[in-house]
Image (spheres, coloured by chain):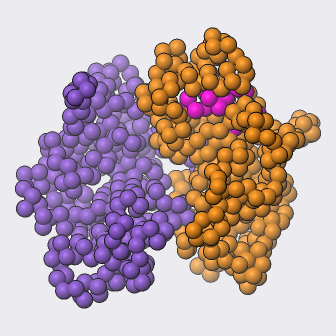
Amino acid sequence: MSAAAPLLEVRNLVKHFRVGGGLFGSRAGVVRAVDGVSFEIRRGETLGLVGESGCGKTTTGRCILQLERATSGQIVFEGRDLTVLGEAELRPIRRKMQVIFQDPYSSLNPRMTVGQIIAEPLAVHEIVADRTQRAQRVSELLSHVGLLPQHGHRYPHQLSGGQRQRVGIARALAVEPSLIVCDEPVSALDVSIQAQIINLLEDLQAQFGLTYLFVAHDLSVVRHISDRVAVMYLGKIVEITDRKSLYDVPLHPYTKALLSAVPIPDPVLEAQRERTVLSGEVPSPLNPPTGCVFHPRCPIAVDRCRVEEPDLREIRPGHRAACLLA
Amino acid sequence: MFITLLHCAAVSTLLEVKNLQTHFVTHGGVVRAVDDVSWDVNESETVALVGESGCGKSVSALSIMRLVAGPAGRIVGGQIFFKGRDLLRLSEEEMRRVRGREIAMIFQEPMTSLNPVLSIGRQLTEGLEIHLRMAPVEARRRAVELLGMVGIPDPERRLAQYPHQFSGGMRQRMMIAMALACNPSLILADEPTTALDVTIQAQILELMKDLSRRFGVAMLIITHNLGVVARYADRVNVMYAGRIIERGTARELYGHPRHPYTLGLLRSVPRLDEPRRARLDPIQGQPPDLTRLPRGCAFAPRCAFCVERCLVETPPLRPVAEGGHVSACWEAANLDRTLARSAAAT
């Protein structure tokens, strides 16, 4: 498997947003949402992308899906660079890449029945042209995600949050994609439902050979589902490696702080645990710090970190981190 | 030993909720959001109220403050004793003197619970001037002190700013400053860190713990995440479908859960301190529809330990261990045995 070309390769992805400079005379600026990100995802694996709000993880996902056009860099999917393709050329490729959104309340059309929602991509991409066959396929998809055929006649508001997320998953599966970007797919759900959806995603991956980019902020969930994990901070990847190395021997001080902030549901363990509470907050991507972007909050930063920007370099085999001191 | 005895003798009940019932009238029928619920908070104690959306945890807090939105919502029964007085019998005027002065509240979403058109300074001094009759100059001095206390740098300058100029974490610090302003004896915190990032969450929780210790304020933390309160709560109440289904000291409840729902919550989340499991162990089924609760135990349709009795008779909260550990489950005593058997079978 390692010899095969990766399904997706992101090279030096940059996405800047221009802000301000409008009617009200605010000063123009550039938000560096994603600032030089590179990684690859192999066929059939799950890459976890973690970070706090505003770190650029969702924008990275949207650029891959071509919902945002990259400012620069390449997104090579199944051997083709998507950033140079036009809308017409992209269309058949969009079928191969689907997305599951965080909020199952706002990502389903309230005026369509569940059946119509799932059938729509089948019609749009002309996968199943015949209406009765389409209905057949819809109930097949519903059963794949653990819903009953009669759910197809209901409207989204008649379903619970967990059931709605299952509809979102069925819609993504409908066009038989090879890559699914899961953008915080469980964080809006009740705790008792989250595990159901995660198990479902894993079953579907095994059954259909899916590849996932799993964007999330919950490090325990990411450890459970991912084969490899990338940690983002302020538009950059600060650490990337396989799951085991990241959780067993985290190298970047930001990853270490994130791991230590995850609460453990055990008062006895928590009482003994040393916590590194990071001071300060994530700086604005409008005006990122010089040198290492993490240095203002870093507990071990030295003078060099203020001026020198660390490369994402291989520190142990297959384990890369962007820290001068790692 | 001697110290613990002394400590025990000194404990007195600050808030006692007795048989509280809060109902909402909806198109679908009457929702018993809080259904005959009793619990208490001792002086300087941190108590958690844990449960999923719709279980009645937020409505419990709103009921204490008498802020349940009418006419749909109404407290239909029970008593809420605070320092010996029944809050439900106070006049609106008397209740105003309790809110913010003696019981303060911190909400989940700091952006929507701060007034966007009032400066930070004004929002802090308003309560001080009304409740404590402080002169504007004095209130301002206290406001600067409060912002410093919650770790907001450069408080003098910050007072003139507006909520939109604060980050999420700073806004939540500001909410804590507002809650502490009049030296209340109880703070109700409704999902205080849910809207925040992981690293900021840790900062805010540590700050709340530190301040509650320093000033001896009792706290009620409402959350859906059992993990968040493990480190901070002295006692934990778990709610499901409008009722408390288990209560105990944090150590007891996390160490020896005696209700299948608590057990399910603890087992369904992946944990960083444990080896990675091949599969998660979710709670089956969907959360209940409160307008159509089943007869008997509300959790029975999702419960792996369900027996016939559960489908007909609602289990009351009964003692299951020392130290006030109670559980509303007919099978509470058999959970360990059933678990051991199923573990042996697999």
Q: With respect to residue B115, does B319 lie above or below?
A: below
Q: With respect to residue B111, does A49 lie above or below?
A: below
| Total labels drawn | 0
Of residue A198 and residue B39, the one placed in the foreground of this image is B39
User: Residue B309 location in percent, x, y?
Assistant: 76, 82
Q: With respect to residue A114, does A4 lie above or below?
A: above
Which quarter of the figure is the C terminus of chain B placed in? bottom right
Which quadrant holds residue A222? bottom left
User: Residue A219 location in percent, x, y?
Assistant: 45, 51
Chain shown in purple: A
Residue shown at the point (41%, 66%) measured from the top left: A165
Which quarter of the figure is the N terminus of chain B placed in? top right
Q: Is residue B70 left or right of residue B8?
A: left
Residue shown at the point (61%, 38%) measured from the top left: B106
Q: Colour of chain B?
A: orange
Q: Is residue A41 left or right of residue B269?
A: left
Q: Is residue B266 visible?
A: no
User: Residue B53 location in percent, x, y?
Assistant: 57, 58
Which quadrant holds residue A6? bottom left
Of residue B159 and residue B98, the one placed in the foreground of this image is B98
Q: Is residue B28 visible?
A: yes
Residue shown at the point (57%, 68%) measured from the top left: B27
Q: Specify the segment rendered in magenta.
A: B173-187
Task: State the residue lying farthest toward the top.
Answer: B137
Residue shown at the point (53%, 46%) measured from the top left: B194
User: Residue A205 location in percent, x, y?
Assistant: 34, 71
Of residue A11 and residue B97, the one placed in the foreground of this image is B97
Q: Is residue A209 left or right of residue A165?
A: left
Q: Is residue B162 left or right of residue A177?
A: right
Q: Is residue B182 magenta?
A: yes
Q: Is residue B4 magenta?
A: no
